[in-house]
Structures are given as structure tokens and as C-alpha cells.
Amino acid sequence: MRKLISILLSALLMATAFSLCGQAAAPAASGKKLSVVTTIFPPYDFVRAVAGDNAEITMLLRPGTESHSYDPTPQDILKIKNCDVFIYGGGESDEWVEGVLESTDTSKMKIIALMDCVDVVEEEIVEGMQDEEEHSHDEDFEDSDVKDRPTFADWKGDWQSGYPYVLNGALDEAFEHKAEEDDSKTAEDYKKYYADAYRIEYNRIVIDDDTITYYTDKEVAKVKYEYKGVVILLNKSGQKRVRYQFQAVGETNGAPKYLQLSDHLIAPGERPEHFHLYNNNDGFEKLSKEFDNWPTFYPSSMTGADIMAELKGHDHEEEYDEHVWTSPANAKKIVQKICDTLVGLDSANANVYKNNTSAYIKKLDELDKAFKDVVKGAARKTLVFGDRFPFRYFADAYGLKYFAAFPGCSTETEASAATVAFLIDKVKAERIPVVFYIELSNEKIADTICEATGAKKLLLHASHNITRDDFRKGLTYLDIMTANVDTLKEALK
Ligand SMILES: [Zn+2]
Ligand SMILES: [Zn+2]
């Protein structure tokens, strides 16, 4: 009898298998679960909610680790290459993704960038916030921070002029991009401006300890230089700029006698991505008044396309904020996109995905309403973060104002004294009851502000990632955000 049952069972199983094969759809039809790979926690949790047991879901980020410093291992890359659906953020933390996808056959794969699912906004530098590019660059620095660079050590190597690329059209895309950002100038205006700025007769220079060899199409001069100190100038917009001065020793064969090197750095020991070589034969006084011609040199290993990309990306503020999931309304859009994608790949389970999704979206609506209710009844609308600020979409969704030490994806952990002082003053002046920190933070800045003001330190969890423990316990995005509702209530009292 037992034997008969087992024969029947296997016959039944085979029949089931055959009938599944008959139902067209892709991987799931062959009995294999859909495999979904995500970078960070929120989409991992969303897929779990939509697919239930019907997908094999992998989160690449290890629980408990920082998402912004994540680098894929070879195994991670293999998982991406072999999955059916790959979901990533699409912002500055994911710059590595492009390279991996370029070397992957993605023809049978669905790829979702969270930032493509919603309307994105730019990362914002609000009052008091510290821009991460500030510290070693020639913006907003103290004169006493400027250090001598008495040798060519930081500039040693083989460099090419950007000027030929302005002329041959390789940089046109960057000029068009700049014109789009600035209504007062056309791409043609930018091209003229850069042609004047970059103009120099040498296509290439090779820098050694104390010499520069100049090339046109052939070597034309090798000149020895002596350091003549550093100057701090105001440019036409009134911003301070630092130039390092060098004067030729002996014969120059027509090459420049006076040089001012400017690379946005104000101390030795860092390798610049490019530098500007102010030059003349008339002396430093006249050179210090030169603001229109600043020949620019890039490593000779760069292609025209590389230089275009660097020129285009030169304005650091243009980064779009990648933390789109912090607004429940955005989470809904992402969940719907995940649902549509899974349905498209695995029609056999379409109803499961659709039912799970509508149940989940109902919960996101409740969450959204809970936040709205808190804000509606609140005594204040201002949040203070002694930390990075990944809640731009959240704050926008609920009409909240915010102050924070750094923008969302800053890799900084040490705030300047000015930033900390600003936040302390803000908390005192507005009698802010709560200072926030975010998950996996060292909490140092929040501690400092709380000590100085008596404010309470609380976690507002952005759910980039969760701890190992919470991961094992099955903590969800909804759990995290529901806890945030209570925290927010306390902060807006
Ligand atoms: Zn520059
Ligand atoms: Zn982030």
C-alpha cells in the first residue's frame, strides 16, 4: 500500500511538472524559481513581500555593513550575471554597477534602478551643512590651512592639454550639458569660453622633480624651475583660489618663464585629477591678474571621452539623491514596478504577485497616513540630524524642514566646528527636543549636539541596511518605518 501511494505520488508530481511545462512562461515554468538580486535592503524586502516563496532573493550588501562603501566581490558579480532580475539604487553609491552590466549579457535579464521608478531630486546643501568636497579643496578654506608645495612631486608624470579636445569637438557634450544648466549661455558660448581658457601651444608636458619638458608634435624645450611660494587670489566671482608659483632657472627656448599651478588642492600629498597651468614671460604680478587663460592638463592616459565626463561632472552639486525609498509614496511606485516585472517573467504566478502587491500597497498607504497624521498634529516642522541626511524624499513628502551635518551620501564622519556650532545654535534657538542619528552611524556628532543642548538623541532609520541580528529576525521595511512614526512624533513635539 505504501508503495502504491508513493508510485501515485510520483505520477502526480510528473503530471504537475508536465502541466507546468505547458504553461509558456520563463524560468519558473521550468520548475526553477526566479532569481532576484538586490544591492541594498529596501528592494530586497519589497521583493520578499511581492514574491513570497516564488523567488530566490539575494541581497548583496552584507547585513550590518555600510552601504556607501560597498564594493562587489567576484561572487557578487557572478550572482548579478546569473540572475533574472537585478535591482539597484542608481545613484552615486552604485557607480560600479555600470561596469558590471557592460560586461554582462543582459538580454534575458530585467534591470530595475530605483531612481528610475520615481521623480528624483538633487542632493541639497542646506544652511550649516558641510559639503564633503570642502576640506582639502580651494573653497571656503582658512588662509592658515594653505601649505607650501615646494617641488613638482604632486604633478610628476605625463600630462596632455585639454585644448585640442575643445577644438576637435570631443568636449561638445559637456558644453551642451553646461548650457542646459545655465540659461544665460549657449553651448557655443561655453565652447568659446573654454577655447580661450584652455589655449596653449603645447599638447603635452612631462613633469619631473624640478623640470618640465614641453611638446608640440615634438619635444621643444626642457626647463628647470624653482619654487617661488604660494599665492591666494580672489577670482572674478570673489572666491579664494590658490596658485603655486614656479620660476624658470636658465634657458627656456621660448617655453614659459613664470608658472602658477592651480589644482584645487591647498596642501601637498594628493594627486590632482587635472591642473591649470597659468603661464607667461612677464612675471608673477601680471600672472596673478590672469583669469581668462588657464590651460588645463589631464593625465595622458585619459581619452577625450574621459575628459568630457570629468568636465561634465565637475559641478559636485548635481548629484541626484539616491535615497528614494525613504518616502512611502515612492516605495509604492517601486513595489508596483517590481510586481509588473515579476508578472512579466513568471505569468504562472501572476495572481500571487498581484495579490501580495495590493496587500502591501495598502500597508504603505497606512504608513503614509500615519506620517501625515503625525505632521498634521505637530508643534514644529523642523528636523535636526547630527549625521548624514538621507531623508530628502521623506522630508519633501511631509513638508518638513531639516538641518543636518552632511548631505545624504557624504562619506564624511567628522563635521567642522562651524557645522556643529550651527546645529547647536539651531537646537537651542528653536528648542528642538530631538537630535537624530541614522543607522550604522558612530553617533559622535549627535552626541556632541545633545551634550551641548540637552536634546534627546534618537535613531531615524533610513533602512539602507539592517544589523545581522535584525536580518535574522526578519525585520522589514514596514517595521523600520513604523518605528520611525513614533520617533518622528517625539521629535516634532
Ligand atoms: Zn579645475
Ligand atoms: Zn545613503
Image (tube, helix red, strand yellow):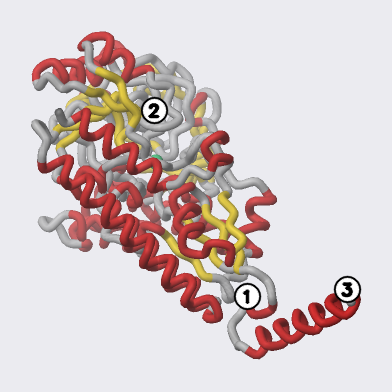
Say few, some or many: other residues with alpha carbon within 10 Å of mark 2 (under 14 / 14 to 19 / 20 or more). some
Q: Is residue 315 visible?
A: yes
Q: Mark 2 or 1 closer to N-term?
A: 1
Q: Earlier in the sequence, mark 1 or mark 3?
A: 3
Give the mark count: 3
Amino acid of disc 3: Arg
Q: Relative to 91, say whether 12 is above or below.
A: below
- Reading the image, the residue beneath label 3 is 2
Q: Residue furthest bottom?
A: 22
Residue 483, image quadrant: top left
User: Which of the 4 image quarters holds residue 134?
Assistant: top left
Q: Which residue is mark 1?
A: 28
Type of amino acid under label 1: Ala
Q: Quadrant of the N terminus?
A: bottom right
* Residue displayed at 48% across by 47% down: 41
Q: Amino acid at mark 2?
A: Glu
- In the rendered view, tell whether residue 215 sits above or below residue 258: below
Residue 308, x across and y down, in percent: 39, 55
- Of circles 2 and 3, the one toward us is 3
Residue lying furthest front: 1
Residue 65 seen anywhere in this rendered image of the structure? no
Asked if ligand 2 lies within 8 A of label 3, the reply is no
Distance between mark 2 and mark 1 Cα atoms: 44 Å
Query: Is residue 206 shown left or right of residue 334?
Result: right
